[in-house]
Amino acid sequence: MTGTRAGELRIEGLRAEVAGREILHGIDLHVRSGEVHAVMGPNGSGKSTLSHVLMGKPGYTVTGGSVTLDGVELLSLPTWQRAQAGLFLAMQYPVEVPGVSVDDLLTEALAAAGRDVTVVHTEVAAEAERIGLATRLLDRPVNVDLSGGEKKRNETLQLAVLKPRFAVLDELDSGLDVDALRACARRVEAATTESDLGVLAITHYHRLLDELRPDVVHILVKGRIVATGGPELAAELERTGYAAWTDEEAEAQPEAPKARAIDPSMHPGAGGPGGMFGDPFADPLA
């Protein structure tokens, strides 16, 4: 870790509902600069809901808790101000933006943040080469007529150019082949050292974490964090699945299982434009 932009994304007691149904039942997560935290869980556990609430999707009602980025409370801010504060969402289903090029999108985003825009074209071209995105695709409107893998590479390119403080990856691995997964995950991993990017990676599967090496792994079940550990926890899930944390165990207890404490030795430092255009989010009940 470079330690050049030390900061923290703190999620404390976050509760949220949609259409009167509570989905998140008190989420606590603390992600520091340069760290990768993975959130894993079965379908319907609230993973995508967490990403939507963090970035400010309309239709969700926050009923408790706080989300701060370097001490700035995000929950009272509109999506674009959360992005300017340093939060980026890589969407599970990247939105198409007809009539707007990647250069135009990133130029406006950087200008709004008061950053140098003269280098945008050069940086976009360099990142496209680094991520394996054909330069001929850069002249197209954002994500229009791109394959699923090309869209995810495009999202990762935007993240690399914008250099946010923290990135939420909502199933970055969804729909990717092995090569695209490796290219995107390794670019994000590199950003954790090059610019101290903090990452909250939401995923179903271990395969993303083989490339994007997590410092901390959390298991989310029925809107609660039920376990926290190191990379070995993801490996355990690969072997056993989520059965130990779902249906029978969850129904048998009046409260969610207590989260397992993380070994401090596995914790580093111990001892977007998301939502700018249209409605880019997926099913609110995911």
Image (spheres, rainbow, N blue to C red):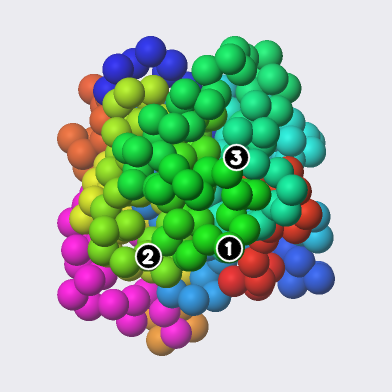
Q: Secondary structure at mark 1?
A: loop
Residue 161 visible to an observer of this rendering: yes
Badge 2: residue crowd in 10 Å (few <14, some 14–19, many ≥20): some
Whether residue 242 is in magenta: the answer is: yes
Q: Which residue is mark 3?
A: 102
The amino acid on which the numbered mark 2 sits, given as a three-letter code, is: Leu
Asked if the residue under mark 2 is in contact with the one under mark 1, i.e. CB atoms within 8 Å, the reply is no
Tell me the residue that label 1 is attached to.
Answer: 145
Q: Position of residue 160 (x, y in %)?
A: 45, 33
From the viewer's perspective, is residue 265 above or below residue 241?
above
Residue 273 in the image: above or below residue 64? above
Where does the N terminus fall, quadrant-wise?
top left
Q: Which residues are magenta?
A: 226-247
Residue 243 in the image: x percent, y percent?
33, 81
- The label nearer to you, 1 versus 2, is 1
Residue at x-position 47% and y-position 69%: 221
Q: Amino acid at mark 3?
A: Val
Disc on res. 176: 2
